[in-house]
Structures are given as C-alpha cells and as structure tokens.
Image (cartoon, rainbow, N blue to C red):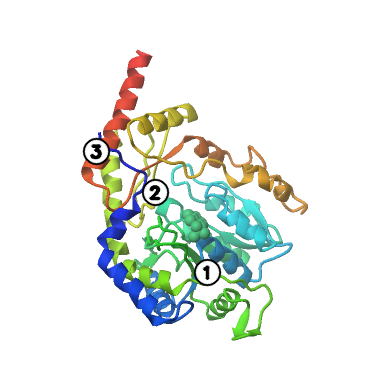
Amino acid sequence: MTTIPFGDLRRQNTGLHDELNAALLRVLESGWYILGSEVAAFEHEFAAFCGVQYCIGVASGAEALYLALAALGIGTNDEVITVSNACTYQTEAILQAGAHPVFVDVYLSTHNLDPARIAAAITPRTRAIMPVHLYGRLADMEAINRIASAYGLAIVEDAAQAHGAWRVDAAGQPQQAGSLGTLACFSFYPTKNLGALGDGGAVVTNNEQLAEQVRRLRQYGWGSKYITAERGGRNSRLDELQAALLRVKLPHVSAWNDARRERAAWYTDLLRDTPLSLPPDEPGHVYHLYVVVAEDKAQRDALREHLKAAGIGSAIHYPVPSHLQPVYSEWLTPQQPTIRPQGAGTLPYTEDLAHRILSLPLYPELTHAEVAQVAAAIHAFFDAQAQVEH
Ligand SMILES: *Cc1c(COP(=O)(O)O)cnc(C)c1O
C-alpha cells in the first residue's frame, strides 16, 4: 500500500528545480532583496494574469485583507459583511482594521456567500462586503455587485484560494478572480494554487488611488523614502526572492488549474455512487480543494479515520466557523445596537457544513492511480458500513 499525503509540495517544486535555482541565484547575486525589479516585474505579470491594472505585492494573504480594508479607510464603527466558514482570516482582518464583522450564511451547495442574505445584514454602518471564493469557486459576484452598487458598498474579494478562477459575464466575456470587486486579495502561501517557497500575498485593483494607498501602507505609510504620508503603515512587503520564485511558477498556473480540474472530475466520476455530496462542477472552478460532504459528523469522522488507517491524508476546511470561535465572543457581542446576535444557531448552513465537510488530496501532480486508490478506500468504507447495517 502506498501512502497518499494530503499535500506534497516537493512534487511541484522539484519539477521546476533548475528554473527556481536560477531565480534564486539571480536574486542572491543582485545584491537587492527588498522591493526591486523582481517584485515590480511580478506585480506587472500578476496584474495581467488577473486582468486588472494594479498589483501590490505584500507579505501574506492575511496582510492583503487588512491592507485592502485600511486603504478603503474602513475602521472604528464600520461594519463589513463576510462569511464565517472560510477560517478566521477575514474576521481578524476586519477586527484589526477596527471594524466589526457581520456574518451571513452560505449556499449549502457551493459553500459560498448567499447574496440573498446580504440585504438583511446591511445597516447604516456597513461599508464593504468581503466575499470569499472558497475552495477555488467564484462567489456569486454578479448578485454581490448588484447589492454593493445599490447600497454604495465596496467589495473586497478574498481570492486567496482562487488564482485563475473565472466566469463569463452577461456579455460573454471571461472575467478573472481579482477583477470582480473594488480590491482583491491573494495569498501565495506554499499550498495555494500559486504558491511561493515561503509567505507572500498581493492586493489587486483597477483603482489607482486605492493602489497608491496600499503601496504606502505596505511600507510604513511612506509617500517617499523616510517621509511618512499616512498613519497606520506596516512592514508588509513581498520579498524579491519570493517574487522571483513566483515569476517562475506563474506561467504554469493555468495548466496546473486544468490538472486540478481533471483530477476533480476523476473523483466526481469515481465517487458518484457513494452517499457523499460532491462539489457541483462549473467551468471556472479551479479546485484549490476538493471538498466532499458526508451525511453527518459521525460518518465524516469515521471516514476520515478509515482513510488515515489506509495511509490517505485528508483535512477539514474549516472545523470551527469564525462566529463560534470562543476567542471572538467578546467582539461579536454587539456593542453596536445595529448588529444582531451572531452566536450559535445564527448561521445554520455554515454550522451544519462544518460538521460534515472533508477535503480529499488534490494537487496537479496527483496521479490517476492515486485518485483511484482514494476512491477505492472510500468505497470500501461505505461497503463495510452497508454490511454492518444489514
Ligand atoms: C490562505 C488564506 C488566507 C491567508 O493567507 P496567508 O498568506 O496564509 O496569510 C486568507 N483567506 C483565505 C480564504 C485563505 O485560504
């Protein structure tokens, strides 16, 4: 029995060994390690990849979310509408900006923000909507944009799992993740669809003023060297080294996304006859993760144990929704009379899914034999269950 890890970054990185090595040496020998030609070139190339005008390389996806909110001037007494099922990155960024997160529930089928629930969450303090393109599937941006423009709200896309995800607009034109809101945030954490060999992130936008603002805030608030133009600046720069490595990988992302989609299709084909709910496919979904939904928590947990015993890695993205994380209880208790209570029971689909989701191994280098082995192990699990029940 061969083991199948949940992820294996060496498969991608050793395949690019010579090019990565050359990029690494180029930076080493340049003698310039912060905000130089590599970051500038990567920003240019990544903006083009997203179909936007401006890209600002920053330290991480988490930093990107904070800087986007700060650039919009969002702070004390403001509210930002987001989801609770995409880890605490959004919640923490909103709180760090000094604002208040307001959660809305997701679609049961896609796990993405349900736009029909946004209007009821809007108050006079609402400033922005922060949808997440979860697992590599675009949120319903057409509906979200309609609501945002009706209420005059900004949109900050969390595109950390959606590099290269796309949709076709009403005019039949393809649109990329990152070009669908006011600003968008990416992470280049090593496991993402575009991953560095360390931390990295980016904010992209078509708004020149907001781009300038993020550019200042990522570097101490400086307008020019040693001259601070803006309070609240950070040290949140993308390294030259990571930018050079990302430039090697960027041209491969579309092919890697195609490979992810192919592997997702293999799973969907092989798992169709199981009790699991499988992710509905759509053309621009780039499958950062392949997430199945079990019938209940006991089944999910038992399946996960069964896979582990079979040498197959799996994961839960994410086990505890933001609004149920004890650490936030104080901040989610509304001091502001406009916000309704946000405790247990307020987001039924989010809470239900957290108990039933399971992420299977999915990366571009996974072989068909490996996908078949995972599927066989899942069938064996349900066959054994059926026997117990008879
Ligand atoms: C990974 C991730 C982030 C955070 O990115 P880092 O680079 O790890 O800080 C934010 N949002 C989502 C949806 C993510 O998956």
Q: Nearer the viewer, residue 183 or 319?
A: 319
Tag 3: residue type?
Ala
Tag 1: residue type?
Leu
Q: Residue furthest left?
A: 369
Horizontal and vertical percent for residue 222?
Answer: 62, 81
Q: Which residue is mark 1?
A: 183
Q: Nearer the viewer, residue 14 or 375?
A: 14
Circles 3 and 1: CB distance less than 8 Å?
no
Q: Give the quarter of the figure containing the C terminus.
A: top left
Q: Which residue is mark 2?
A: 289
Label 3 within 8 A of ligand 1 by Cβ: no
Residue at 37 percent across and 15 percent down: it is 389
User: Is residue 337 in view?
Assistant: yes
**Number of the label disc, if any, that sits on residue 372:** 3
Marks 2 and 1 sit apart, C-alpha to C-alpha, by 23 Å
Q: Nearer the viewer, residue 172 or 379?
A: 379
Residue at 61 percent across and 50 percent down: it is 103
Horizontal and vertical percent for residue 212?
Answer: 56, 80
User: Is residue 143 in view?
Assistant: no
Using the image, determine if residue 310 lies above or below residue 45: above
Horizontal and vertical percent for residue 79?
Answer: 67, 59
**Number of the label disc, if any, that sits on residue 156:** none
Using the image, determine if residue 264 lies above or below residue 296: below
**Of callouts 2 and 3, the N-terminal one:** 2
Using the image, determine if residue 38 lies above or below residue 355: below
Q: Which structural element holds mark 1? A: strand
How many marks on residues? Answer: 3
Q: Residue furthest top?
A: 390
Residue at 46 percent across and 72 percent down: it is 239
Q: Is residue 232 left or right of residue 31?
A: right
Within 10 Å of disc 1 (Cα), the crowding (few <14, some 14-19, many 20+) is many
